[in-house]
Image (tube, rainbow, N blue to C red):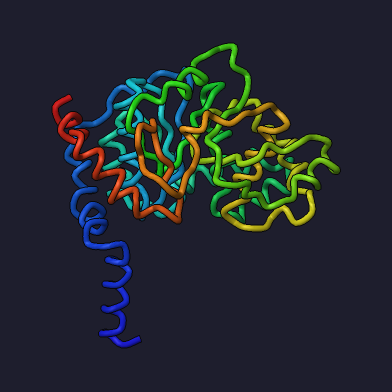
């Protein structure tokens, strides 16, 4: 490709969703770095675990700060580096979340691969799948009985009341997540029913929700990884494993206002999960809405 052709391609890619989207992504989004750190993240009622990478960590700061601001909770935080974060990326994350544990990929590899030695399928999967740390590393480093599973493309707009109630109710014993647009698994639920003897919940999405530590059972995961053709889509397999573990453990979806939806707007929703097909709306809709409603100003003045 010629230099001119490459330039045209980059411009088309950058502005494919309009100048407004590019403005909020490139100009407004970094302003989150001018807000005050979230210093109090010490509550181990549950622990937030997130996986991030070099091109995603800025979105993660938005996701986390909107959660902490609107929930007014102080849950402990563990950030997992997929191996691509720079030293500056890690330093910036540590500045904004000074009490967070930031797990470097090399140290995680040593610890997690050692922990998986007696589970050969899990071990091989952890070695070869880019998203596998979201399963194994989250479980290995979890220092609470409950985990708030959170992707970096989720923004909060008000208190997520039902989610918080389920996270904090000691008698609530199910895993609970946002519902996907449709079921997106690497294996047919009928195969699971025939081989493992339980029904798989429909529309399980691993972007937001409560996961009990006891549900991430390595013996179960080892069994599930033996199912035929389960290693299909590389980005669906971790969601599939969470769905399988949760379905055997006990699970339900969060109410419909937490669902992934590709159409419509924020309206009065507590949050929105901006999955790949609508990622551009995270900037033109989500960040714009937050800025227009004084979110950045409130953080700077808090």
Q: Nearer the viewer, residue 234 or 259?
A: 259
Q: Number of numbered discs present?
A: 0
- Residue 272 coordinates in the image, percent (x, y): 40, 39
Residue located farthest toward the right when viewing the structure as drawn: 194
Relative to the observer, which residue lies in front, 90 or 215?
215
Q: Quadrant of the N terminus?
A: bottom left
Q: Is residue 198 above or below residue 143?
A: below
Q: Is residue 267 above or below residue 171?
A: below
Residue in the picture at 63% in, 39% down: 242
Quarter where residue 264 is shown: top left
Q: Residue furthest bottom?
A: 2
Q: Residue at x 19, y 39 (%)?
A: 292
Q: Identify which residue is drawn at 45% across, 30% down.
A: 48
Q: Position of residue 254 (x, y in %)?
A: 54, 29
**242 sits left or right of 81 in the view:** right
Give the position of the C terminus as an image quadrant: top left
189 on left or right of 152: right
Q: Nearer the viewer, residue 137 or 175?
A: 175
Residue 267 x/y as whole percent: 35, 36
Quarter of the image where one finds residue 135? top right
* Whole-percent x, y for residue 163 in the image: 47, 24
The answer to whether residue 53 shows anywhere in this view is yes
Query: Where on the picture, by quarter, is residue 23?
Result: bottom left
In percent of the image, x 36 and y 21: which residue is there? 74
Residue 54, visible in the rendered structure: no
Q: 45 or 232: which is nearer to us?
A: 232
């Amino acid at each position: 490709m010629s230099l001119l052709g490459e330039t045209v391609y980059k411009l088309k890619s950058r502005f494919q969703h309009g100048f407004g989207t590019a403005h909020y992504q490139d100009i407004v989004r970094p302003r989150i770095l001018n807000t005050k750190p979230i210093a109090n993240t010490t509550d181990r009622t549950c622990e937030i675990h997130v996986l991030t990478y070099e091109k995603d960590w800025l979105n993660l700061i938005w996701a986390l700060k909107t959660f902490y601001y609107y929930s007014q909770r102080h849950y402990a935080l563990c950030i997992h580096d997929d191996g691509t974060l720079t030293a500056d990326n890690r330093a910036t994350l540590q500045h904004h979340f000074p009490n967070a544990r930031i797990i470097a990929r090399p140290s995680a590899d040593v610890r997690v691969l050692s922990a998986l030695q007696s589970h050969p399928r899990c071990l091989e999967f952890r070695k070869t799948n880019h998203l596998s740390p979201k399963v194994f590393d989250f479980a290995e480093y979890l220092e609470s009985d409950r985990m708030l599973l959170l992707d970096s493309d989720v923004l909060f707009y008000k208190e997520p009341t039902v989610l918080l109630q389920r996270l904090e109710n000691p008698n609530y014993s199910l895993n609970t997540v946002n519902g996907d647009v449709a079921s997106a698994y690497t294996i047919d639920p009928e195969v699971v029913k025939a081989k493992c003897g339980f029904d798989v919940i429909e529309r399980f999405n691993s972007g937001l929700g409560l996961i009990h530590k006891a549900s991430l059972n390595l013996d179960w995961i080892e069994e599930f990884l033996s199912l035929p053709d389960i290693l299909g889509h590389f980005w669906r397999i971790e969601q599939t494993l969470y769905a399988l573990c949760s379905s055997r453990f006990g699970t339900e979806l969060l109410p419909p206002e937490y669902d992934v939806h590709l159409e419509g707007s924020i309206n009065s929703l507590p949050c929105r999960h901006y999955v790949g097909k609508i990622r551009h709306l995270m900037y033109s809709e989500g960040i714009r809405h937050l800025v227009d409603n004084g979110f950045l100003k409130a953080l700077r003045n808090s």
